[in-house]
Image (cartoon, rainbow, N blue to C red):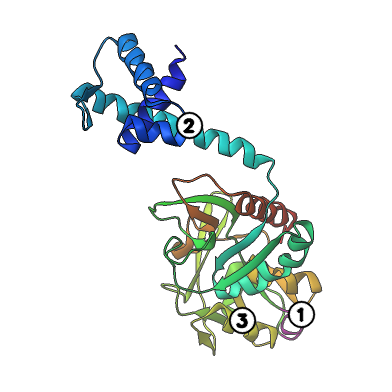
Amino acid sequence: MNLFNSIELFVKTIESGSFSEVGRRLQIAPSSVSRQINALEEELGIRLLQRTTRSINLTEAGQIYFEKVSKILDDLAEAKLAISQLQATPKGLLRINAAIPFGERNIVPLIPEFLNKYPKLKVELILEDRSIDLIEERVDLSIRIGRLEDSSLVARKLKENNFVVCGSQTYFQNKGTPTTPDELKQHNCIVNKNIFNSNSWHFKKGNSSLTVPVTGNFQANTGGALFNAILSNLGIAVLPTWYVGEEIAKGNLQVVLKNYEVTLPAMTGSAIYALYPAGQYLPPKTRVFIDYLVEKFNEDNA
């Protein structure tokens, strides 16, 4: 007796409801199906099915056995799929969700190279600042920034969410460059009102922590507003590196207080994550895009 084949026949018989139906599906005689299940019962030393002329029903032992072996067969099928998909060519439509500013500044510029690398893929980028239901909205993955909350989603960390103090070259030429956090008191500091206690900026150097009260003549409730304000030479702001990295590289913005780590209590433990639904094997199209993001973000040391 081939034990594995007998177990598969047993499960398929329960799922189809009769020996004749599973025989029809597998193109074997119903009597052969019955004999193999009889052999399985003899091997186990217990009856799995109650048979009548009209139906078959699971015994108590049969129910327990069915639940256990069904899970094993599902796991084996998933393992086979996982291995086969390692070699599969990514193709189809990849639906990606991200917050609006991050997606526009950090995802869109990466798409052309990605699509050149995987020509059988198409990408739909859904930019929303709200959190969405990936299953309900048929989204393959979401890129989110912040502290990771309890979720049914699987998360892969892409990059730390680091912050810097920065302003324009013109501003620092006119107002001077602060070399210590305490010198920020002499500067026009632009704050984000969406961050709790935003009028105090927090720093760390070695084992020492420092909190500095800051003031300025402009405040706003979005990172974009702060970004445009400092580009317009208005003052200094604390912004994430993913927001200002390109302008820093171009020389339009300058980072100051590089010897100090910016620590925002409201953002402690935050990072940039790729989120995707749990309980399923990661499709090749999703896997290659996440791997691509990890590669590109690791190249960026801003």
- Spatial CA distance of label 3 from label 1 is 14 Å
First in sequence: mark 1 or mark 2?
A: 2
Give the CA distance from mark 3 to mark 2.
83 Å
In the image, residue 1 sits, relative to residue 228, either above or below, namely above
Determine which residue is flagged by label 3. Answer: 187
Q: Identify which amino acid the numbered label 3 is placed on.
A: His
Residue 11 in the image, given as x and y percentages of width and height: 36, 30
Q: Residue at x 42, y 27 (%)?
A: 8
What residue lies at 44% left-to-right and 67% top-to-bottom? 132
Measured as percent of width and height from the top left, residue 273 is found at: 54, 56
Comes first in the chain, label 3 or label 1: 1
Tag 1 residue:
169
Where is residue 183 shown, x and y percent of the image?
Answer: 61, 73
Badge 2 marks a residue whose secondary structure is loop
Looking at the image, do the residues carrying marks 1 and 2 touch, with CB atoms under 8 Å apart? no
Q: Are marks 3 and 2 in contact (CB under 8 Å)?
A: no
Mark toward the viewer: 3 or 1: 1
Nearer the viewer's eye, disc 3 or disc 2? 2
User: Quick one: SS at disc 1?
Assistant: helix
Q: Which three-letter amino acid code belongs to the residue tagged 2? A: Gln
* Magenta region: 168-174
Label 1, label 2: how far apart the Cα atoms are: 78 Å
Q: Which mark is residue 27?
A: 2
Q: Main secondary structure of the magenta part?
A: helix
- Based on the picture, tell me whether residue 241 belongs to the magenta stretch: no
Can residue 64 be seen here? The reply is: yes
Compared to 284, does 233 lie above or below?
below
Image side of residue 116 versus residue 60, left or right: right
Q: Secondary structure at mark 3?
A: loop
* 285 and 47: which is toward the camera: 47
Q: Name the residue located 69 percent from the left edge and 88 percent from the top edge.
A: 232
Identify which residue, 129 or 187, lies in the foreground: 129
